[in-house]
Amino acid sequence: MIYTMTLNPALDYNMTVNEFQKKRVNRSVKEELIPGGKGLMVSRMLKNLGVDSTAFGLVAGFSGKELTQMVHDLGIHTNFVTLSEGMTRINVKLWGGIEGEINAPGPTCDEKSLQALIKKLEVLDSDDTLVLAGSIPKGLPNDLYAKIFEQLKDRHCNIVVDATGELLKSVFRYRPFFVKPNHHELSELYGVELTTREEVWPYAKRLREEGVKNALISMAGEGAVLAAEDGSVWFGEAPSGTVKNSVGAGDSMVAGFLAGYLSTHSYEVAFRTGIACGSGSAFSEALATGDEVKTVAERVRIWRVE
């Protein structure tokens, strides 16, 4: 079973205007309210691929109740902890000549609620995979993901991390199954500027040297790089297409890589499926459907460089 963890989920309020104008009243032509947060986006993409998952997370207030119901309606299993105060954040995503977003900070998590959530992880065993994705609520330490690894070290499950900064760096010594920073996040991690696959290549290998089993680096229109546990390094080109919505593309890549690997145990298949899912979602107004992923996968070009 795949489990996803979203400590700071959100309701994403997507609004489209014909053309956004500053200092003017703008009227939307389309609105959509969807469950968001990186772990939940991974679960949603997995569902589109026909793969079941269970979503762990923290919710609060009226918006938390709505988010929980919406996730249930999508057919995704949930195992949330409800906070006693605050409300699940509502993020605004705007399209209309520009693409922008305003993300709220989310509620504060108390220690009792955190421990209740961590206790739920006791169901995991060596056949399971846990995805730790996204930011954490106020009041929680920057090494929280590392503490979760420590809690689960005797269960021998695969753990995936899609995070930034100290949240990501602190888990390297626990040998995560794979991490997926984008090239900007990788640049920040090592204090360099990385813009091409050739520049990313040695730093993806460095992640592996520091403990990561598989380093998957997304690069938007530049494609992706994979430094795999078996010592291979792969480059991938992003297929051509019109980008309609970049929100969720990285999460879709995580879901695609997982689905591809768990079904075949082939890094080549996993890498191709990951790129197809990420690109497919970018070319769609929502997360890509299974059929859309299959169509895009036929146009994905990957090759082994080491």
Image (tube, rainbow, N blue to C red):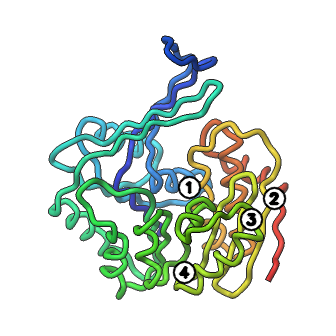
Q: To which residue does mark 2 refer?
A: 300
The amino acid at mark 1 is Asp
Report how far apart the C-alphas of labels 3 and 1 lie in the structure. Answer: 15 Å
Percent x, y of residue 235: 78, 69
Q: To which residue does mark 3 refer?
A: 272
Q: Secondary structure at mark 4?
A: loop
- Left-right relation of 96 to 171: right
Q: Are marks 4 and 2 in contact (CB under 8 Å)?
A: no
Mark 4 or mark 2, which is nearer to you?
4
Report how far apart the C-alphas of labels 1 and 2 lie in the structure. Answer: 18 Å
* Residue 212 numbered tag: 4
The amino acid at mark 2 is Val
Q: Are marks 2 and 3 in contact (CB under 8 Å)?
A: yes
Nearer to me, 284 or 207: 207
Dot placed on the residue nearer the N-terminal end, 4 or 2? 4
Q: Are marks 1 and 2 in contact (CB under 8 Å)?
A: no
* Classed neighbour count for the residue bearing mark 2: other residues with Cα under 10 Å, few (<14), some (14–19), many (≥20): some
For image coordinates 68% across by 39% down, the residue present is 284
Above or below, comparing residue 37 to residue 232 in the picture: above
- Left-right relation of 124 to 110: right
For image coordinates 60% across by 59% down, the residue present is 184
Q: Secondary structure at mark 1?
A: helix
Percent x, y of residue 83: 20, 50
* Classed neighbour count for the residue bearing mark 1: other residues with Cα under 10 Å, few (<14), some (14–19), many (≥20): many
Which quarter of the rendering shows the C terminus? bottom right
Dot placed on the residue nearer the N-terminal end, 1 or 2? 1
Q: Are marks 4 and 3 in contact (CB under 8 Å)?
A: no
Report how far apart the C-alphas of labels 2 and 3 lie in the structure. Answer: 7 Å
The amino acid at mark 3 is Arg
Nearer to me, 306 or 187: 187
The amino acid at mark 4 is Val
